[in-house]
């Protein structure tokens, strides 16, 4: 961070009190204290009371945000037969079969934001774990990205479907829109994501589920959220 950026961050951080804010207070504050010249992504960072090392405490899921993400995702569909045509008609950016798998394997090609595959192609797609896995792009039936209904899957991703998944430290990081969004729409997106994470609480998780939640723009300071209301919903 440059000196000027550091000063701007410090000035922005001074405007954030050290207390938990309601979502309705926090979103306009995040928008107010932004200082970057580009349209930043607004992110949620949630620390959960789970131990992801145990399979029965894994938290993951998907949600189509009410107002999208503010950008159109590039979608790759790996399929065969009629499903290739269905994917193209639904608006997929890249469509193919084994030749796509080979391209990714041989070139390390990653110019896409989401990958959808039909079940019959998963034997081939399974070879792409080293490329797709670290980027969170490996198709998975639980997130609706391994499916025979490729048209609907493509449309959902284009409409602003996001995947959330707890990392090995028990934290979920996910974008919920752009700082330029109308405040009410950004608030609705963030609330929808928080509700989805609450709904995904594993039955094996004990004690306080949502430990802390912070909302921020890409470059801006974090604003702590009051998680009381969300913990009450899953008590």
Image (tube, grey):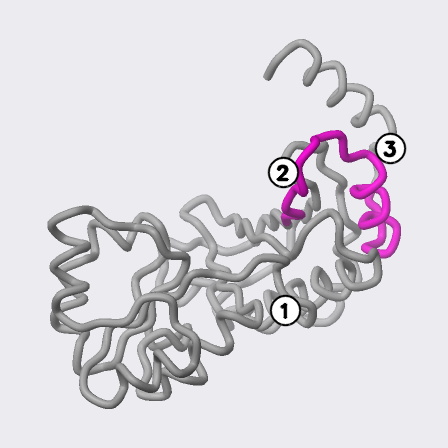
**Mark carried by residue 218:** 2
Instruction: Tell me how far mark 2 sits from mark 3, CA to CA.
Output: 19 Å
Q: Residue furthest top?
A: 3
- Pick the residue in front: 174 or 195: 174
Q: Tell which tag, 2 or 3, sits nearer the viewer.
A: 2
**Mark carried by residue 17:** 3
Q: Position of residue 193 (x, y in %)?
A: 64, 64
Report the residue at 82% width, 47% height from top: 26
Report the residue at 34% width, 51% height from top: 111
Q: Residues within 10 Å of mark 1 (few under 14, many from 20)?
A: many
On screen, residue 84 above or below 29: below
**Residue segment shown in magenta:** 20-43
Instruction: Tell me how far mark 3 sits from mark 1, CA to CA.
Output: 28 Å
Which quarter of the figure has residue 70? bottom right
**Mark carried by residue 65:** 1
Sequence order check, earlier mark of 3 and 1:
3
Dot 3: what SS? Answer: loop
Report the residue at 70% width, 33% height from top: 220
Asked if the stretch drawn in magenta spans residue 21, the answer is yes
On screen, residue 216 above or below 116: above
């Amino acid at each position: 961070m440059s000196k000027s950026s550091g000063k701007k961050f410090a000035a922005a951080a001074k405007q954030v009190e050290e207390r938990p804010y309601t979502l309705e207070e926090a979103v306009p504050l995040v928008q107010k204290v932004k200082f970057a010249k580009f349209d930043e992504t607004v992110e949620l960072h949630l620390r959960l009371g789970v131990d992801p090392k145990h399979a029965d405490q894994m938290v993951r899921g998907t949600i189509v945000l009410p107002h999208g993400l503010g950008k159109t995702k590039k979608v790759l569909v790996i399929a065969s037969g009629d499903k290739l045509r269905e994917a193209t008609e639904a608006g997929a950016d890249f469509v193919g079969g084994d030749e796509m798998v080979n391209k990714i394997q041989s070139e390390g090609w990653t110019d896409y934001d989401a990958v959808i595959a039909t079940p019959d192609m998963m034997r081939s797609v399974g070879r792409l774990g080293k490329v797709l896995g670290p980027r969170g792009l490996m198709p998975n039936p639980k997130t609706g990205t391994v499916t025979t209904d490729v048209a609907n899957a493509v449309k959902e991703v284009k409409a602003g479907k996001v995947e959330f998944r707890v990392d090995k430290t028990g934290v979920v990081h996910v974008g919920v829109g752009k700082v330029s969004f109308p405040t009410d729409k950004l608030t609705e997106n963030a609330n929808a994501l928080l509700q989805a994470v609450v709904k995904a609480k594993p039955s094996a998780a004990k004690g306080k589920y949502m430990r802390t939640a912070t909302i921020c723009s890409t470059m801006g300071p974090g604003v702590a959220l009051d998680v009381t209301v969300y913990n009450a919903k899953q008590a």
